[in-house]
């Protein structure tokens, strides 16, 4: 059964709507991260980098998205975990090259959380 011109137009409209939605969501997440960076409510700790772990999110029975979780501990041994979203990695490229037990100072804002609302937003690494 051949595709009609009406079906082609409908597919085109769906593709444009999908691209617009994706673009809008991406811009929103970048805007939220910029807000976190500018927040006056920043908390800073020094300690060490513990590990990077991968969490695979499955949808419809297949692996769709891999999320990286970065865990640090402060001088008192309290652990802090942050996600490595695209805006975070773009702002803090050093995050991907940290080695376990490496001494670092890290900063985050408790007024902003990741897209799932689970982790505070990492804003600085020294």
Image (cartoon, rainbow, N blue to C red):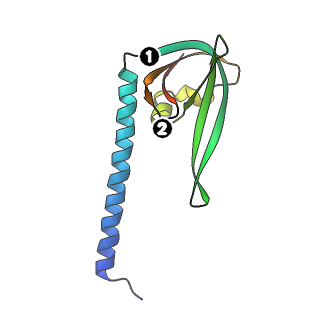
Q: Quadrant of residue 104?
A: top right
Residue 9 image point, x, y percent: 29, 73
Secondary-structure class at tag 2? helix
User: How far is disc 2 from disc 1 in space, using C-alphas?
Assistant: 20 Å
Q: Which mark is residue 102?
A: none
Relative horizontal placement of residue 95, taking residue 13 as reference (left or right): right
Residue nearest the observer in this picture, 76 or 29: 76
Which quarter of the image is occupied by the C terminus?
A: top right
Question: Label 1 belongs to which residue?
Answer: 42
Residue nearest the observer in this picture, 50 or 58: 58
Relative horizontal placement of residue 60, taking residue 15 as reference (left or right): right
- Which residue is pictured at 60% across the width and 30% down the height? 70
Q: Is 87 above or below relative to 60?
A: above
- Which residue is pictured at 57% across the width and 27% down the height? 95
Relative horizontal placement of residue 103, taking residue 90 as reference (left or right): right
Residue 57 image point, x, y percent: 58, 49
**Residue furthest to the right:** 101
Q: Earlier in the sequence, mark 2 or mark 1?
A: 1
Q: Quadrant of residue 17?
A: bottom left
Relative horizontal placement of residue 36, taking residue 79 as reference (left or right): left
Secondary-structure class at tag 1? loop
Q: Quadrant of residue 18?
A: bottom left
Count every numbered label the image shows and give the total: 2
Residue 122 image point, x, y percent: 50, 25
Of tags 2 and 1, which is closer to the observer? 1
Residue nearest the observer in this picture, 54 or 117: 117
Which quarter of the image is occupied by the N terminus?
A: bottom left
Near mark 1 (Cα within 10 A), the count class, few <14, some 14-19 or many ≥20, is some
Question: Label 2 belongs to which residue?
Answer: 86
Residue 98 image point, x, y percent: 63, 25
């Amino acid at each position: 059964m051949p595709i009609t011109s009406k079906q082609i137009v409908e597919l085109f409209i769906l593709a444009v709507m999908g691209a617009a939605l994706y673009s809008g969501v991406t811009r929103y997440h970048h805007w939220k991260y910029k807000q976190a960076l500018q927040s006056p409510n920043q908390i800073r700790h020094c300690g060490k980098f513990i590990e990077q772990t991968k969490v695979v999110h499955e949808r419809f029975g297949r692996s769709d998205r891999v999320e990286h979780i970065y865990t640090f501990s402060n001088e008192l041994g309290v652990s802090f975990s942050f996600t490595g979203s695209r805006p975070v990695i773009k702002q803090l490229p050093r995050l991907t090259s940290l080695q376990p037990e490496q001494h670092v100072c890290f900063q985050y804002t408790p007024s902003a959380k990741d897209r799932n609302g689970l982790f505070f937003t990492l804003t600085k690494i020294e």
